[in-house]
Image (spheres, rainbow, N blue to C red):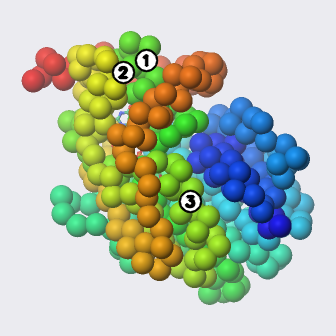
Amino acid sequence: MVKILVAGAAGFIGSNFVRRLLAAGGHEVVVLDSLTYAGNMENLAGLDASNGFSFVHGSICDPAVVKAAVQGCDAIVNFAAETHVDRSIENPAVFIESNVLGTMVLIQAAVGAGLRLLQVSTDEVYGSLGEEGLFDEDWPLDPSSPYAASKASADMLIGASARTYGLDAVITRCGNNYGPRQFPEKLIPLLIANAMAGETLPIYGDGLNVRDWIHVDDHCDALRLVLEKGQSGRVYNVSAVGELTNREVCSRILAALGKPESLMRHVDDRPGHDRRYALDPSRLQNELGWKANVAFDEGLSTTIEWYQANSAWLDNVRSGEYRGYYERMYASRLESGTTVAEED
Ligand code: DAU
């Protein structure tokens, strides 16, 4: 039985990862999560000691908590992070604290206990691509937002710790995930939630920014493979080669829900908005034999079904803190925007 400390698993990708790992069998999981706004115990509902699951409420920034949580574990997987670009523009300090200082605490715990650390990073560390080409793992780090810079810093601390302290670490860099239990500040769940409620769908700028979409299950399978078989010190890009413009994503959601295109509204752009992300996953495919299994339209349709079947989950996460956030982020943008129908 392999025992893994999974930090930040009350969030979207982490909770999906833990569910898949425990369902596959052969693992015990200790989840460490500080339950900030995007951490949600409902995401872990149904998991308990009989599944090999246990939970520690605490922060990766607290060395004593981490040291205690890691006892008896064979590896650490780190999902714990502030992840939303717009929030990082508004309040960068918490990103530095969680994503940089917190990762350093995990590094020291991993070194102290002689454990492998899998750092779940992002394609945003590479910056923005032009119309051609794909990021490979040797692409220079050129982050655009405080969020991306904090993740790049964590990646560099890991590289430095491998050299200096002999840390056994692997890093994954994935594109934009979608699937069940994603907090609706992110594009796809925000658009689904708004469309379901008959509200406006806000599209930043011209809507032609490109993201590389992957279903969370495919990402989680890649993470498990890298954790088990990845070469120490190596970075692995994770991509289903799923490039789409934001406008196209929006149209597909509206079509799937039978809602009119007139709900789509261009609004003020995000400052420093990266134009295009696209990753080359050849290393992961050729060295570890990974491949994506979920086609975008199929994954989008099951994701929409999940949000429709879990409207109580959605209502819950859209109340409280989210209301103030949405108002701050979108009220003036929605007033000044233009609908796509008016423009075309
Ligand atoms: O690429 C991986 C990254 O994907 C992760 O590292 C980040 O944690 C995750 O937040 C995501 O970053 P993005 O900034 O690409 O995701 P977001 O869902 O915020 O935005 C996706 C695209 O949609 C981006 O071009 C901005 C645009 N957008 C976003 C929102 C929330 C809109 O047009 N309207 C919106 O309301």
The Cα–Cα distance between marks 2 and 1, rounded to whole angstroms, is 7 Å
Contact between labelled residues 1 and 2, with CB atoms less than 8 Å apart: yes
Residue named by callout 3: 221
* Image x and y of residue 307, in percent: 52, 26
Asked whether 111 or 289 is in front, the reply is 289
Please, what is the three-letter code of the amino acid marked with disc 2?
Leu
Would you identify the image quadrant in which residue 46 lies? top right
Number of other residues with Cα within 10 Å of mark 2, as a class: few under 14, some 14 to 19, many 20 or more:
some
Name the residue furthest top: 198
Dot 2 corresponds to which residue?
257
- The amino acid type, in three-letter code, at marker 3 is Asp
Quarter of the image where the N terminus is located: bottom right
Q: Earlier in the sequence, mark 3 or mark 2?
A: 3
In this rendering, which labeled residue sits more in front, label 3 or label 1?
3
Q: Position of residue 163 (x, y in %)?
A: 62, 87
Extreme residue in the left direction:
344
Q: Amino acid at mark 1?
A: Met
- Residue 196, numbered label: 1
The residue positioned 80% from the left and 67% from the top of the image is 2
Q: Position of residue 22 (x, y in %)?
A: 73, 53
* SS type, badge 1: helix
**Foreground tag (2 vs 1):** 2
The local secondary structure at tag 3 comes to helix
